[in-house]
Image (cartoon, coloured by chain):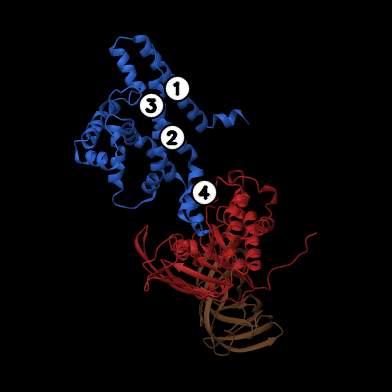
Chain colours: A red, B blue, C brown
Amino acid sequence: MIHIALQKQLIATNGVMLLDIDIEIKEGDFVTLYGDSGAGKTSILRMIAGLMTADKGYVKVNDRIWLDTKNKIYVKPQQRRIGYVFQEYALFPNMTVKENLLFALEKGQDKQIVNELIELVELGELKNRKPDKLSGGQKQRVALARALVRKPEILMLDEPLSALDHSMRSRLQDYILKMHKQFNLTTILISHEIGEVIKMCDNIFVIENGRIIKQGNPIDVFTSKQVSGKFQFSGEIVEVKREGIIYVVTVLIGANFVKIVADKSDVKTMTVGDKIIVASKAFNPLLQKIN
Amino acid sequence: MMDWQPLLLTFKLALITTFLLLIISIPLSYWLAYTKSRLKPILETLVSMPLVLPPTVLGFYLLVTLSPSSSLGGWLNDHLGLQFIFSFQGLVLASVIYSLPFMVHPIQAGFSNLNITIMEASYVLGKSKIVTLFKILIPNIKPSLLTGIVLAFAHTIGEFGVVLMIGGNIPGETKVASIAIYDEVEALNYDTANMYSLILFAITFSILLVVYIVNGGYLKRFWK
Amino acid sequence: MNTLEGKIASIKTNGSLSLVTINVNDILFQAMIIETPDTVSYLKKTNPVKVVFKETEVIISKGDGCELSIPNKVTGNISTIEKGVLLSKIIISTAVGDISAIITSDAMNEMILQIEEEVTILIKTTEIMLSQ
């Protein structure tokens, strides 16, 4: 069990914000911190990693205390067994792919793990390249592999896929899931992609202004109102267009656009960029085989 | 007649100064680049003072504080046997202080421009600050280091005022090339002065040229 | 979207399908859904639920609709008509509240619908969703 309780005054764009959370994560779970930018997600990861100090806090990971401000316990980042994947990769530019991984080895650790990881993320052919000769997706695979060399107790991913295009994203998600299972990791992911969250995680913490406002199974959290329509997707509004007395709302679901007819009263509170659920009765859609 | 000794002395001084500066400047620049201490502006100002002060001011104060008749100079002389006035080690000390900004500024800029996350990435991989400094930070600021080394070296070759103040003009001990040139001109030996000047010009020109070629990536472009 | 609040009156289940009867202001609505009391917690007798259906699925009849295979029927009076080129929106006040319907303007013209006129609205059971 991982217990994380943190308090910290943060300087946000609109003044001072108090980050105040108290969460528990089961060993082996894949959890997501979900919320708008500036809600405090990255600060939480940085405090768990020990890269940022907490005003008050208590972090206990599998019976070991990493932080306890009351009893003046602070374990240095170096001694917290974490894998951290940064949003901007943070690969060492002076080292090749393989050297980046070798650098992460602990004293006396078997080098075999480096080769295994390189094979797992399918970077064997690129292992002697420097990071500036890699694409974004390749860099993130190196960063992921590097984070796993020490066999961390917690893997933390700070919006690792936000800079990647859709198909690369989906492949990287598969790599992350594979690693999560293979290494029995407890993984904390920061994401604000509903699809990604539903695909990957067991548990979600929704963060708003430094506080957890909701938590639970992602589908339950996102479909807070249970609707009996079985034909249900979450997506993002791309366009709201008036056509006569009705409105046509274009929604991006995954990589597909769908158009939905809506009434004025429906679109009143909706604007482009809003996350919405598209639901229909399972009785309506037609199925046709593609030849 | 041209005497090679002042030139050799100049390069000996520049080499030793640069070496000492490198050892001092890496930790100092690291501290200046990453500290949140309130002392930072004061230290930064002190490091930059030689850029704006006339060298004679620096030379004058060194002369006053280090002369055997002063308390510090006397103590150094009595207990450590170190004599800084009109001696080669005095020149080294003065040059180190005088060229400090030329070494510290590029290295500090190099550290500041590095993406701080690579440092954090190294920490979460379990690596200490020292390992991170030598394996990650320094290899990634090589151009800044090179710039610092060359600027400090070239600047030490060119100094005059501070050397004259504290070192005087003792052949083989403190008579460096810039002093020798002044000496020859005073004695109306324009030819010899010209020889010294030409050699200094050619050497410093070549050094700077190499730096710009290396740092500008020109070599990479041609040698692909 | 029309949303009416009611209470579950009865549930008939067969396999993974359920036919749920909902009492909205003493008028009964029926909804066919692919859920059972085992799969969702809110499917319990007397539990409050919302009956949700889209305006475009509402059928308007001048008669009482008894000869049609549609069990959900409510009578009311037309309160507003908003005419468009192809589609028109009609709001009917009923015992369960205002219900809006979007039908083709052609159909509306043929039926000669007018404000204050009494009509019956009909919704198929497979078009009704339930929401908590």
User: What residue did someone put label 4 on?
Assistant: B135
Parent chain of label 3: B
For the point 37% across and 12% down, which residue is it? B192
Q: Is residue B142 left or right of residue B73?
A: right
Q: Which residue is mark 2?
A: B149
Q: Which residue is at 29% across, 49% downward?
A: B39
Q: Nearer the viewer, mark 3 or mark 4?
A: 3
Question: Mark 3 = which residue?
Answer: B157
Q: What amino acid is found at the position of numbered circle 3 in the picture?
A: Ile
**Which x, y percent locates residue B206?**
47, 23
Viewer can see residue C38 = yes
Give left or right: position of A240 versus C68.
left
- The picture places residue C1, in percent across and down from the top left corner, at 54, 71
| C-alpha span from label 4 to label 1 | 33 Å
Q: For this rendering, which residue is in front, A56 or B135? A: B135
Q: Are marks 2 and 3 on the same chain?
A: yes
* Amino acid type, residue under disc 2 in the picture: Ile
Judge from the rendering whether residue A261 lies leftward or rightward of residue A76; answer left or right: right
Residue at the location (26% across, 32% down)?
B85
As measured in the structure, the alpha-carbon distance from the residue carrying label 1 to the one carrying label 2 is 15 Å
Q: Quadrant of residue A198?
A: bottom right
First in sequence: mark 4 vs mark 1? 4
Measured as percent of width and height from the top left, residue A283 is found at 68, 73
